[in-house]
Image: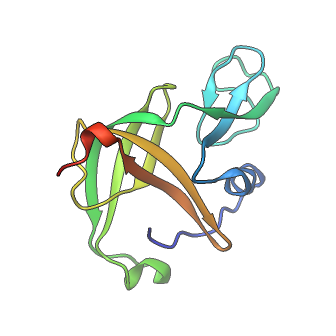
Amino acid sequence: MAEALLPQTYQGRSLAERMSDDSLVLQVCENCSAVQYPPRECCRECLSDALAWNAVSAEGRVVAVTALQHSLEPVFQSQTPVHIANIRMETGVTILAFCDAGTTAGQVVNVSGANEGDRFGFQVVPKASEKTP
């Protein structure tokens, strides 16, 4: 996975602290059950501030894939191309995640978090039925 920049907001740091390979944890509104991404202070559906961090479904479908060929950000310059997927999650939110070069639009994938000290981000994990032999 490409090394990512540290989040600059309280909500972003809270997300980074909860990232793991085991489950996908996002904010869920305790009032209307809407899943939130990116992290925020109020629900995007009902504006409630009762948001809790919960494990949610990690499954989604790749909408689009691109490769970052050049970056002004020093952390990415030595790692180009960086492959990035836009994923529409079962929960209704859309996530950008690092992926392999072989990831294609329409592919069903799981998304996991990776938090390794000063590195964090989402990573695409192909579902077993979607892996190529």
Tell me if residue 24 comes above or below residue 30 in the rendering. below
Relative placement, left or right, of 95 versus 52 is: left
How many numbered markers are drawn?
Answer: 0
Tell me if residue 59 comes above or below residue 118 in the rendering. above
Q: Residue at x 73, y 22 (%)?
A: 47
Instruction: Give the percent coordinates (x, y) of residue 133.
Output: 17, 52
Tell me where residue 2 sits by quadrant: bottom left
Instruction: Give the percent coordinates (x, y) of residue 79.
Output: 37, 79
How is the model colour-coded?
A: rainbow
As drawn, which residue projects farthest toward the left?
A: 133
As drawn, which residue projects farthest toward the top?
A: 32
Tell me where residue 9 sits by quadrant: bottom right
Relative placement, left or right, of 54 versus 5 is: right
Tell me if residue 88 comes above or below residue 123 in the rendering. above
Q: Residue at x 44, y 68 (%)?
A: 1
Q: Residue at x 51, y 73 (%)?
A: 3
Instruction: Give the percent coordinates (x, y) of residue 42.
Output: 74, 30
Tell me if residue 28 comes above or below residue 13 in the rendering. above
As drawn, which residue projects farthest toward the right?
A: 50
Camera-nearest residue between 74 and 119: 119
Relative placement, left or right, of 120 versus 17 is: left
Instruction: Give the percent coordinates (x, y) of residue 75.
Output: 49, 80
Camera-nearest residue between 25 and 22: 22
Tell me where residue 67 sits by quadrant: bottom left
Camera-nearest residue between 70 and 51: 51
